[in-house]
Structures are given as C-alpha cells and as structure tokens.
Image (spheres, rainbow, N blue to C red):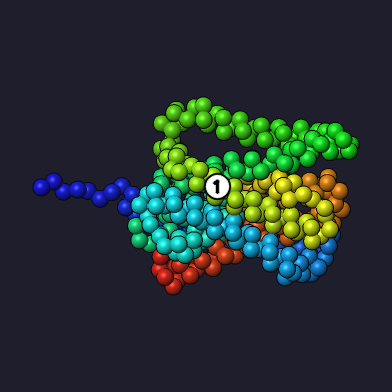
Amino acid sequence: MRRAGPPPSSTKPTPFRLPVKQLLLVLGLVATAYALALLFWGDSPRASLARLGSWTGVQAAGLCLLNYALRGLRWRRWMAHYGRHFGLLQGLRLYLAGYAFTPTPGNVGESVRGLMLARNPLGARQSLAIFGAERLADLLCLLLLCLPALAWAWERGVVQGLPVWLAWVLAAGALVALGVLGVLLRFRHALLGRFAWLHDAWACLSVRPLRWLALTLLAWAAQGLAVWLICRDAGVALAPLTASGFYAVAMVAGALSALPAGLGGAEAVLTGLLVAHGASAATALGITVLARLLTLWLAVALGVLALLYSAAITKEISFS
C-alpha cells in the first residue's frame, strides 16, 4: 500500500523571535513625536486625549473595532481556503495578534500571522500569499474611497480658488496606483509564474471576490466615518464621504512611503488635506493625532494583548 507523505503546508516554519525592543522603540518615538507636535503646533496633549473619552471618541473607537472585525473575517475565510479553520472569536483573536507587528515597513510584519500558529502553521509561501491578498484588496478599496477626495479637490480648485495642482497631485497618485494594478493584471500570467506566493495570493482573491470586496469596503469606510466623527467633534464641517476620501488618500500615501505603518507620510497628508479644507493647523494636527491613535495604535495595542494571551494562556501561538 502506498504511503502518503505529509502535506507541504505542514512543514514547521523557521523559528523567529518577537522583536520586543524594536516595537517598544517605535512606540516610544511615535508617542514622543505626537506629544511634541501637539505641544508646539497643535492643541495640548491633555485636551486632545480628553476627546478619546467623549461619546464621539467611543463611537469612533467602535467603528475602528468594526474595521478590525471585518478584516478579521476576511482573513479567517482565506485561512479556511488553506484548510485552517477557526471559530469566530478564535479567528478574530489570532488575526488581531498580527497587528502587534504593524509598525514595520510596509506592514510586512503582519505576514507572520499564519507562521505563528503553534499547531498546523502555514508555510512561508502561504502566509505571504494571504498577506499579499490583504494588501491588494486594501489598496483597491482605498483607491475607490479616494474618489470623493479627488472630486472635492477638483471642485475647490476650480470654484473656490484652491490650488488646482493639489487635484492634479491627488489624481496623479491615484493614476499611478491604478497603473500598478493595471500592470499586475496585464502581466499577471508572467508574474504569477515567476513568484509562487503571488500566484497563491491571486488564488485567494479569486475565492468569492464579491464577499472580500464588500468586507474590505465596509471596513475602510467604517474608519473613514470614524475620522468624520472626529472632524465634526473638532468643529470642522466635512461631508462623511469627503472625510473618508481624505483618510483613504492618507492611507495610500503612507503605504507608498513604505515607512513603518506609513508613519509620517499618512499624518502629513491628512493634516495637509484638512488645512486645505479650511481647518487651522492646530485643529488639523489634533484631528490627525486622534485619528491615528484610534485607527492604528488601538489596533497595535489590541494586537499585543491578543498576542500575549494567545501565546501565554491558550498556547495557540509559538515563537520557536
């Protein structure tokens, strides 16, 4: 009788160490930069952080949690595509654990989600495939959400005297990103044949595309709505779609910068767009800091907690 060999995906991944020192260094530098920015150019840190405990802050945090949950459902479905089935809460917790590695260039640290599993972990190729599918889906939906910001910039440039070059810059950035997607689609067969993980990423995207598209659009729209709530609370009159567009543009700019979690680039673009809309520099900076605390650093904090719980309590994550 012929003996079947073990599936390739059951191969234990290469051990890695949790970069605790690097994460703490990034957190310390970011916290210092945010505090100094608020002290010198924005509202006081105490006044800005006090808004987090307001009803608006709670609502915005809830929308950000909805973003994480929807993207977690997407990840859980793609893991099931590779035969890794999790319960709802278990899958969301393991997905959140990956956010502990978000402060890395291009968020590439999140690709270790599947590698960390203590039982039946993914191989490196499959883990990269899901990470690639996540980034491509996010980029596509963020570009769609950028459209209201492009319409705003063009209208303000033509009618109200806002520099038309701003609209051209936004449009050029969107066209470049769409061009990259177009190249990927045009030469997908050559690329898929050359990069095995990209082939697997495309396979993930081909599984029920309408479902992951809806989950991704709703997820990023929820965070855009959170930014709108923060703007409204700060007295900045901004339409929900325009606020979502501003946030989407900032996220795309941060991703293109390839800096850890888009730090610096995303903040500069969001602050600049708010100032261009008519907000004062202090108000725009305060909104940006609060938005990033809720849309990024809340996820990192929850990710660290989920990571520690899954490693120390349930033993579902291993670092060796």
Q: Quadrant of the C terminus?
A: bottom left
Residue reaching furthest to the left? 1
Front residue of 2 and 234: 234
Residue 5, compared with residue 234, is above or below; it is: above
Q: Position of residue 272 (x, y in %)?
A: 79, 46
Mark 1: amino acid: Ala
Residue reaching furthest to the bottom? 313
Kindly identify the residue that appears in the image at 37 percent across and 49 percent down: 82
Front residue of 34 and 133: 133
Q: Position of residue 291 (x, y in %)?
A: 71, 57
Kindly identify the residue that appears in the image at 69 percent across and 39 percent down: 147
Kindly identify the residue that appears in the image at 64 percent across and 40 percent down: 144
Front residue of 175 and 33: 175
Q: Residues within 10 Å of mark 1 (few under 14, many from 20)?
A: few
Name the residue that disc number 1 marks. Answer: 214
Indicate left or right for 236 with 85 as reference.
Answer: right
Residue reaching furthest to the right? 161
